[in-house]
Amino acid sequence: MVTSDLLGESSAAPFPSVGEVLEDVFGVLESRKAEPPEGSYTAKLLLGPQDKLLKKVAEEAGEVIIAARDHDLAQLRYEIADVLYHLMVVMVREGLTWDDIAAELSSRRRK
């Protein structure tokens, strides 16, 4: 079993850490915004109508709820990944970074 913490440190991981994956995907999203490839789903979300992206976030969150309610771990893993992806698209679109999110979460530890 691979163990990993939120900072991306892991022991004997045969795959990249959570932090590495999130940073990598975030970088791809930023590049899609800067140089949108024709036909890119991500570029459409980043540059198209905001409502379409926000509806997608809500839809994916609802799918997380259903998978969790049904205790379907394989589906839950898939849907959580979808939510994270779409939230990162929102972050890039709105100009937020992981540092912004880390600062917010860190401030909550003191409360």
Image: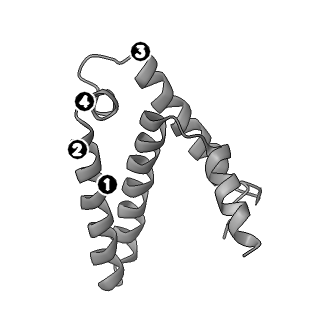
**Residue 60: % across, % down:** 29, 60
CA gap, disc 3 to disc 2? 22 Å
Q: Secondary structure at mark 2?
A: helix
Image quarter (top left, top right, bottom left or bottom right) of the N terminus? bottom right
Q: Earlier in the sequence, mark 3 or mark 4?
A: 3
User: In the image shown, does 59 or 14 lie closer to the viewer?
Assistant: 59
Residue 12 seen in this snapshot:
yes
Q: Identify the mark at residue 48; answer none if there is no mark.
A: 4
What amino acid is at disc 2? Asp
Residue beneath disc 2 = 51
Q: How is the image coloured?
A: one colour
Q: Identify the mark at residue 74; answer none if there is no mark.
A: none
Q: Secondary structure at mark 4?
A: loop
Q: Earlier in the sequence, mark 1 or mark 3?
A: 3
What amino acid is at disc 1? Val
Q: Is residue 5 shown above or below 95?
A: below
What amino acid is at disc 3? Glu
Q: Secondary structure at mark 1?
A: helix
CA gap, disc 4 to disc 1? 14 Å
User: In the image shown, does 108 or 73 lie closer to the viewer?
Assistant: 108
What amino acid is at disc 4? Gly
CA gap, disc 1 to disc 3? 23 Å
Q: Identify the mark at residue 57; answer none if there is no mark.
A: 1
1 and 2 marks in contact (CB < 8 Å)? no
**Residue 55: % across, % down:** 23, 52
In the visual, does 105 lie left or right of 47?
Answer: right
CA gap, disc 1 to disc 2? 10 Å
Residue beneath disc 3 = 35
Determine the residue positioned at 32% across, 27% down.
43
Q: Quadrant of residue 78?
A: bottom left
